[in-house]
Image: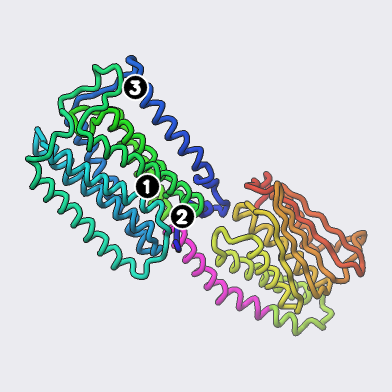
Amino acid sequence: MRGDTSLLALGGPDGVPRRRFVDRGRQTILITVGAGLLVTLLISVLPITRFAYRSDEAHVAIETAAFLIPALAAILFVGRTLRAYSRTDLLLAASLTLTAATNLCFSLIPAVVDEQPGPFATWAPVTGRLFGAALFAAAAIVADSALSNPRRALIRTFVNVTATVVLIALLTAVFADDLPRGIDPHLSPETSSRPRIVGHEVVLGVQIVTLLLYSVATVGFLFRAERERDGLLLWVSISAALSAVARLNYFLFPSLYSEWVYVGDIMRLLAYVALLVGVSRELLTYQRRAADAAVFEERRRLARELHDGLAQELAFLRSEGSRLSGTSDPAVMRMATAAERALGEARMAISALTTPVGEPLDVSLRRAAEVVAQRMGATVDVTTTGKVQLPTAARQAIERIVREAVGNAVRHGQAEHVNVEIEANDSVRIVVVDNGRGFDMTRKQRADAFGLVSMRERAEGLGGELFIKSSPGEGCRVDIVVPNGRPEPAKGWRR
């Protein structure tokens, strides 16, 4: 199956998942098809909306786009095939390559070199586009599977596509004198009060068959986009929907084979524009991934420097402080405590630098809590329900709060086990419960006890609250509640 799909499903740079474009896929397709059919109806029926433009140059411009955009998309799907080993991507690459070659060899070049293209300029494109649409529909409905050797499959596929184009060209050229005219190129749609279903019956039949093939592709790619959460496939579905509407217009008046630019040509151009938008978004996402990879590699380098330098020195200071733990000198004890906290901060920074963007909150909290608890022989359980959607800054602040809470439980409360529960709906609630000896909340805190104050200030800085409940011999419970989504730091709060 597909091993690497569109990156539009990934979270944003701050770690918050974007609203998926595919979530609105069915609505988007319905609007696209509805708008296309409405435009077709209005222009075909209402005289005041009649549209027709006689221009060979416009046809050349449209055919240029019809060659370049599928060619670019084919290159993209070749890359996806090599990366994901996907048969669907292979078929899409083949379909788009055949379509691009057909538009270049059988439409664009004849239109440029021959002012009066003959039957070749009708029947060769008809055949090539029909095969391209068939491959397009096959890519949508054939079950996806992993290719054992994608490079070999691509070479074999492009050899077959090249052979198909050459065979169509040879057969059409050989029998060109015996082929009928598809449509009178001088026939105009602008004087007709109704759709002009004219032209050879085979040409009209091919338009209906192609319409059906693109309709199948629309539904197939829509379902695949929803199932695989692939934004590019949804744009492919939109392109197929517009192509189906274009074929309906070509059935009502086959301007594709005349001197006139009509509604079908506009719909066909829009289909390629939709494909170009999808390809552009995919390429931008690849660029974003490359930038994120470079940033992550630099963060890992900084983490290595911290670990091999600062963290090692702080670990030495902590060990020396532990050796002197029996002393009665309060200054020495404060230095030992400061070294312990500094080492914890260094480890927290190293953990943050090596954490991938978008890592689930329960995973990062489990790692942070275990680092603290296991050093003192305690165990940690982390459970989560619901979907957490918090920016990276908020996740890091919560991670620090949980780390401090677990550290207090095992260091001061002598806890042997700590439970961390995460519950997400409209807000995110994190509960840290330990089985330690607890403490008397009515007792005045020491002047140098900054841990609880820092935890509360971090929670309030995220627009949330922190509650602590404890009593001697009953352990301690810490509740952190922050808004789910994208909480903004409170004014005056600085990490």
Residue at horizontal 24%, vertical 28%? 261
Which percent across, then down, holds residue 323? 75, 85
Q: Are marks 2 and 1 in contact (CB under 8 Å)?
A: no
Q: Is residue 423 left or right of residue 330?
A: left
Q: Is residue 436 left or right of residue 37?
A: right
Tell me, yes or no, if residue 105 can be seen here. yes
Total labels: the figure holds: 3
Q: CA distance from mark 1 to mark 3?
A: 31 Å
How crowded pointer 1 is (Cα within 10 Å; few <14, some 14-19, many 20+) is rated as: some
Q: Which stretch is magenta?
A: 289-317
Q: Which mark is residue 480?
A: none
Residue for badge 1: 280
Q: Earlier in the sequence, mark 1 or mark 3?
A: 3
Label 2 residue SS: helix
Residue for badge 3: 43
Residue at horizontal 64%, vertical 46%? 488
Q: CA distance from mark 2 to mark 3?
A: 39 Å
How crowded pointer 3 is (Cα within 10 Å; few <14, some 14-19, many 20+) is rated as: some
Above or below, 203 relative to 355: above
Above or below, 450 relative to 212: below
Q: Is residue 158 magenta?
A: no
Label 1 residue SS: helix
Q: Of residues 118 and 319, which is closer to you in this image?
A: 118
Which percent across, then down, holds residue 185? 15, 28
Q: Amino acid at mark 2?
A: Leu
Residue for badge 2: 7
Display coloring: rainbow
Which percent across, then down, holds residue 477? 83, 62
Q: Of residues 338 and 235, which is closer to you in this image?
A: 235
